[in-house]
Image (cartoon, helix red, strand yellow):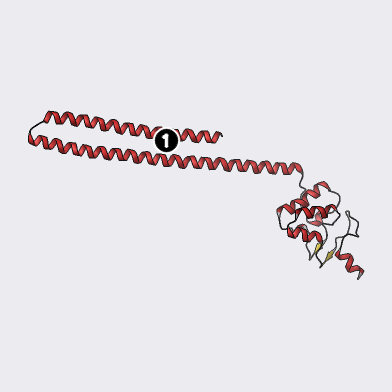
């Protein structure tokens, strides 16, 4: 009976390397905390002397940890107490030092910055595509209007030619109308190009921000 009590608790066993890892069918506190994902309690238990080498149903506390935060807690403890336990037997991998964590945070920040830049570039490309499409639609509309106007003018010239009246006046009006339509097409195309250029400039400024 005394032997069974000793297997279920580590409080009477001195902490240190070389201590024989215990096994029990009764779950140890460190295993329970690791399985529940309570990183703060895991840290307290490790500091109080709970042995991470002990196994419950063949697994160490690290091996049953339910979250990355808990696993990192074991690694942080190993970094601060490298000689306290046989961490290889405990299944705890490389130590997690403050420098390593700072590097990890820097990489995450860099990754977020790249994602943000890609999102801005994607948004700018979409806006440019929409603006280009709108500009093309406006130009197409202007061309269609010009074609309709030209058709009306051609019909008018034909009518005047058949009547034999106002031929010179009709030709002058037709030439004037065609010139006006050409100017309108050029103005609309130039306006569309300016909008596209403005969107490109705005996208470049967003990337600089």
Q: Is residue 60 visible?
A: no
Residue in the foreground of this view, choosing between 158 and 83? 158
Depth check, front residue: 75 or 70: 70
The quadrant in which the N terminus is found is: bottom right
Question: Residue 173 location in percent, x, y?
Answer: 18, 30
Q: Is residue 100 above or below residue 68?
A: above
Spot the residue most to the left: 164
Q: Identify the residue position indicated by label 1 in the image.
A: 196
Q: The C terminus is located in which quarter?
A: top right
Considering every residue shown, the one lying at the far bottom of the view is 1
Rendered view: 57 above or below 103 = below
Say whether residue 191 is visible: yes
In the image: residue 114, left or right of residue 39: left
Q: Position of residue 14 (x, y in %)?
A: 91, 56
Query: What residue appears at the point 34 percent right and 41 percent down from the top-left corner?
Result: 137
Q: How far across and down, in percent of the image, does residue 25 sit? A: 81, 68
- x 10%, y 34%: residue: 161
Query: In the image, 130: left or right of 20?
Result: left
As rendered, which of 74 and 130 lies closer to the eye? 130
The x, y position of residue 102, in whole percent, is 72, 41
Q: Is residue 190 left or right of residue 30?
A: left
| Residue 49 lies in quadrant | bottom right
Q: Quadrant of residue 166?
A: top left
Q: Is residue 63 left or right of residue 157?
A: right
53 w.r.t. 83: above or below: below
Q: Helix, strand or loop at disc 1?
A: helix
| Count of numbered badges drawn on the protein | 1
- Could you classify mark 1 by the number of other residues whose Cα lies within 10 Å: few (under 14), some (14-19), or many (20 or more)? some
Residue at image position (44%, 39%) is 128
């Amino acid at each position: 009976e005394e032997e069974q009590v000793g297997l279920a608790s580590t409080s009477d066993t001195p902490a240190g390397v070389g201590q024989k890892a215990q096994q029990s069918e009764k779950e140890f506190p460190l295993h329970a905390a690791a399985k529940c994902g309570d990183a703060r309690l895991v840290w307290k238990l490790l500091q109080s002397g709970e042995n991470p080498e002990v196994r419950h149903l063949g697994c160490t506390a690290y091996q049953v940890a339910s979250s990355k935060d808990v696993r990192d807690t074991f690694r942080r403890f190993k970094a601060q107490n490298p000689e306290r336990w046989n961490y290889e037997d405990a299944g705890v991998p490389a130590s997690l030092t403050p420098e390593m964590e700072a590097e990890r945070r820097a990489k995450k920040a860099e990754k977020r910055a790249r994602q943000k830049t890609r999102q801005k570039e994607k948004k700018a490309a979409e806006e440019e595509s929409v603006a280009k499409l709108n500009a093309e639609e406006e130009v197409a509309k202007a061309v269609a209007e010009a074609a309709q106007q030209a058709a009306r003018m051609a019909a008018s010239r034909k009518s005047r030619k058949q009547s034999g009246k106002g031929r010179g006046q009709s030709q002058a009006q037709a030439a004037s109308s065609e010139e006006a339509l050409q100017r309108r097409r050029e103005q609309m195309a130039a306006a569309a190009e300016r909008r596209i250029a403005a969107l490109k400039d705005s996208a470049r400024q967003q990337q600089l921000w």
